[in-house]
Amino acid sequence: MSTRVLDLRRTARQAAIPLLDLREVSAVDLEAARTNWRERMASEHASARVFGALVGGMMNAGLPAAETSRVADMVRQELDHAALCAKVLTALGAEAVAAIVDLPPVPAHEDASPLEGILRNVISVGCCSETVAVALVATEREQAGPLSLRRVLDQILRDEIKHSRFGWRILGRFAPALSVAERASLGDYLVDAFEHQLRFHAPFLSMPCASEAGVAIGAPHGRSSWLVFVATMETIVVPGLERSGLPAAEAWRAVRRAERLAA
Amino acid sequence: MSMTKRAAARSTGLALAARVATVSGLAVAAFGLAEARLASASEPKVTSAASDGRKPLSVVTSAASDDTKPLPMEGWVKTQGGCGCAPCWGPPAPPRKRSARARRRARGAR
């Protein structure tokens, strides 16, 4: 596994956010906030490649050029988010440098038709990940303290909303064109997609729970974030996928059965 | 029913996500369920003592005060594990589709 370094110190100095007043924040919470924003910086940067990979799959599936063009814009938006996170990190008194480890490839799903293949990725990225992101960012925005931080979260939230809407729009428009076999296959994939979401968000459970002053500058409250994640999946994502004619409730039950079987 | 500041923030976040995910209102209706669950789940409520000003609000909403009750799907993570990375807002690469056989084998191995 190779380690790459993402250095956005220079970017962070352009239109920099003034240093935040951190007198009411404990040292532990400050360090947790810095860690969180550093990881966000790396994660947003790395996510650009995920949208980049969607472009080719969309072309291959013959999706509308206007939608493909929007996804190309999303690549840039993710890179912009990384720059915003770098500015916050710098305003918290830390250097905007992070390690980027392990960039798994975005699957092309050669075992599926081009339409089913791209819908697998759109469901995972737009309908699942980005919908959860909307709920998480909006929750954090509500608790953010400094005005400069709320402005950053507003900007990121605006884009996450676009990314989530894209997923639901594409699914709503193209799911009806799926064959019975493709629909069943996509239903099987949902089990993998849901388990992937659970694994990806699982570290929330071992994250610290910051004080109100810490959360106000972006320190994590892991248990609260986990509650948001599970509620988003169970009450927004699964019903939304069902509405598109996919057996999402059965897939979620299958995931939960695994929990009971292992207990 | 009063909620802590954190619970109220979660409700706002979920409401927005529900609006984004649908225009038909289905998910918004489902959100009502989420709100009810969240309001009752593992979050200390603002007590009368706190809300009438005898204690500062931060006492009942303070960090880690809700760290003892089990959370939904926590058992799944304990048995199945996590990816070990930091969950952030940027979407990770989607998973590949496992074969039915691989899925069964994975279940059996746990």
Image (tube, coloured by chain):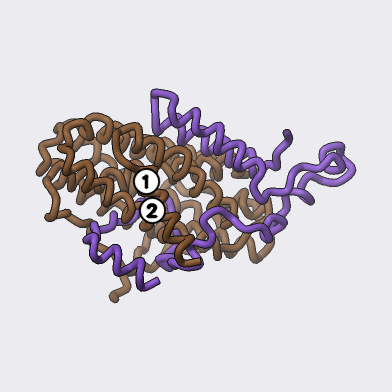
- Badge 1: chain ID: A
Q: Quadrant of residue B27?
A: top left
Look at the image and tell me whether residue A82 can be seen: no
Q: Furthest residue to the top?
A: B24
- Pointers 1 and 2 in contact (C-beta within 8 Å): yes
Asked whether A152 or A251 is in front, the reply is A251
Q: Residues within 10 Å of mark 1 (few under 14, many from 20)?
A: some
Residue where numbered disc 1 is placed: A250
Residue A241 position, x and y percent, is 34, 38
Say left or right for A50 vs A218: left
Residue drawn 82% across and 38% down? Answer: B51
The chain shown in brown is which? Answer: A
Say left or right for A118 vs A33: left
Asked whether A63 or A215 is in front, the reply is A63
Residue A130 position, x and y percent, is 38, 44
Chain B in the picture: what colour? purple
The C terminus of chain B: image quadrant: bottom left
Tag 1: amino acid: Glu
Residue drawn 68% across and 41% down? Answer: B5
Tag 2: amino acid: Ala
Q: Helix, strand, or loop for circle 2?
A: helix
The N terminus of chain B: image quadrant: top right
Asked whether B50 or B44 is in front, the reply is B44
Name the disc covering residue A254, or none.
Answer: 2
Q: Residues within 10 Å of mark 2 (few under 14, many from 20)?
A: some
